[in-house]
Image (spheres, rainbow, N blue to C red):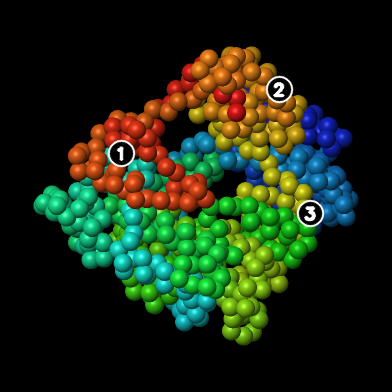
Amino acid sequence: MKSLTDLWRELAIELASWCHTSATNDYKKLVRRVESEGLSFLTITLPSFGKNFEYCLDKGRVDDCDFSGFRKKRGLPLFLEGFLRQIFDVSTGVLLAQPSHDSIFAVRQLTLVFGKINVACSDGRTRFAFESYVKCEQDLSSWETSNSFDDSSFERISQLLFADVFAKMDQIIFDGDLIPRHGPGQTADRVSGNQKYDLLQWSERLEELFPFGEYALPNWRYYYRYDDIEILEPGAEIPVRVIAVPKTLSTPRIIAMEPAHVQYMQQAVLIPLIQNLEAKVVEGNTRDNLSSYFLGFTDQDPNRDLACRGSKGDDLATLDLSEASDRVHILHVEAMMRRFPSFWKAILATRSTKAEILPLGIQLNSLRKFASMGSALCFPVEAMVFLTAVFLGIEEMQGHLLTRKEILSYVGKVRVYGDDIIIPIGSVPYVSSVLARLGFKINTSKSFWTGKFRESCGGDYYDGTDVTPVRLRHMLPSSRSDIEELQSLVAFRNLLYWRGLWNTTSWLDNKIRSRNLLRHFPIVQSTAPCLGRQSVLPYEAERIDDYLHAPRVRAWVVKSTIPASEASGVGSLIKCLLSLVRREPDDLSVIFPDTVDNRHLQFAGRPSAVDIKLKWSAPF
């Protein structure tokens, strides 16, 4: 705990020097609160202060009800008062005409630095998150019975946006041109590694459109494998396994692990879907593909650029949704895709309809949500639903039916990446109303349109200035054996360096060396395969490789151990055949990494262990 408060002190001292103030009293207050409240003050209370600060920036003032739990003097909190005085008028609490951008960044950095640290939540908070998952499903059922969902308008807008993509997907699926794949993660049926290529289960729903022999066998000479396969009827299908993974100390992230055979075919649909959604022109057409202007899956920079423009007064709002993926109803998706029978059948066949929540002892047997986080198709489908909802709202604002030409006029004004939505400010009331009617909830604490603060896709801006804080993702390491924490600390150190916090960076460098965490910690470039210090200064070669005649430095290198997982003969053959026919563009390598190496038939899956070794390594 003390190491975290020491790090906070160094950040506060340096940021105070930027803003020509003092943080001495702030540090004393922080120490007292940490002694009485523990880690939760750093990871829950401080981030709540930071989110309340963003809200005050957006509304342009500090009210009496703001910053609950912190003592105030003439309206402003005493904590971080030196910075806040340079942002808000001390007598009225009103935002200054020209607030200090450095102070805005300082408050956000000091309050949010530990906000997303990877620490497990309490049992009570985790249970509440599972109960919220169930409650969300109940809300969807209630919405389905009481809504006035105009599926015809939803369908019409979606056809304007995605008809070319859906038609192409319909053709691909009808022609049987999908190429399936397995991921490295865990599955609901607890099949892992290379055993995933020896599937023992398939569903009737999949068999109807994707015969096992066509997609899970090397060729029809292996037809005898059907004798070993259990074809599951709809009532006997394996439910997704709902689990909690760390997100913040205040709440975990709830995801659902899919059965191996379901995710196998989800990935088959996902790859061409994303390729076509991002294509400027869908193959077989001559007109522009509208979705490519408004959706993104591999690059978050367009959203960040628009958020920065919006903060400078470009009439752009940033919206964020609560429980976004869990509130996408299957009826939303049906309205978009039902005119394309093969594609719609594929979406239904690769969708799990049951969920098992072991911590609560509950099984949901008829899910109304399209998919939970964990489904490969969750992210692109929710983005398409949200984009359709956005243009429905814009259509209501315009007062007449939209045309392709009018939709094109919103290029550079509308952008969706998952549940990060950017729209014109004037359309906010209309889009908000449509989203509410569709059963979605806007996260008001993370949506901005009235002030000069905007955030989207991890980029935070105030009046054109980047005020994104650098966050520590793991607890600080106590020894070199804490490899994941050590990697996180080095990444955190390098981000601080490029943010200009050089005094704190120097303090961290000394701590890393003095604690003997990394005896060798050379200057390296960002692409180096070792743990090192990034810098504007050039690296210094410590030796020249005898064979490659290339510069080398002495540094620690992290090596992952892939678990042993030997594939069977048939499994080996189909894995090799799939790797040969799969051809993915370079721009999709971020979400579809190629992990095949010369030992992939003996070792597979996520790393089971990591080790760190001192080696001669390339500094670039």
> Considering the numbered disc 2 on the image, is that residue within a helix, a strand or a loop?
helix
Is residue 128 visible in the rendered structure shown here?
A: no
Disc number placed over residue 193 in the picture, else none: 1
Q: Which of 573 and 513 is in front in this view?
A: 573
Quick check: 387 above or below 73?
below
Answer whether labels 1 and 2 touch (C-beta < 8 Å). Answer: no
Quick check: 343 above or below 589?
below
As measured in the structure, the alpha-carbon distance from the residue carrying label 3 to the one carrying label 2 is: 31 Å
The disc labelled 3 sits on which kind of residue? Asp
Rendering coords of residue 281 (x, y %): 52, 67
Which one is earlier in the sequence, the residue at label 3 or at label 1? 1
> Considering the numbered disc 1 on the image, is that residue within a helix, a strand or a loop?
helix
The disc labelled 1 sits on which kind of residue? Gly
Q: Which residue is drawn at 48% across and 47% down?
A: 589
The disc labelled 2 sits on which kind of residue? Trp
Q: Nearer the viewer, residue 110 or 68?
A: 110
As measured in the structure, the alpha-carbon distance from the residue carrying label 3 to the one carrying label 1 is: 49 Å
Q: Which residue is drawn at 69% across and 45% down?
A: 468
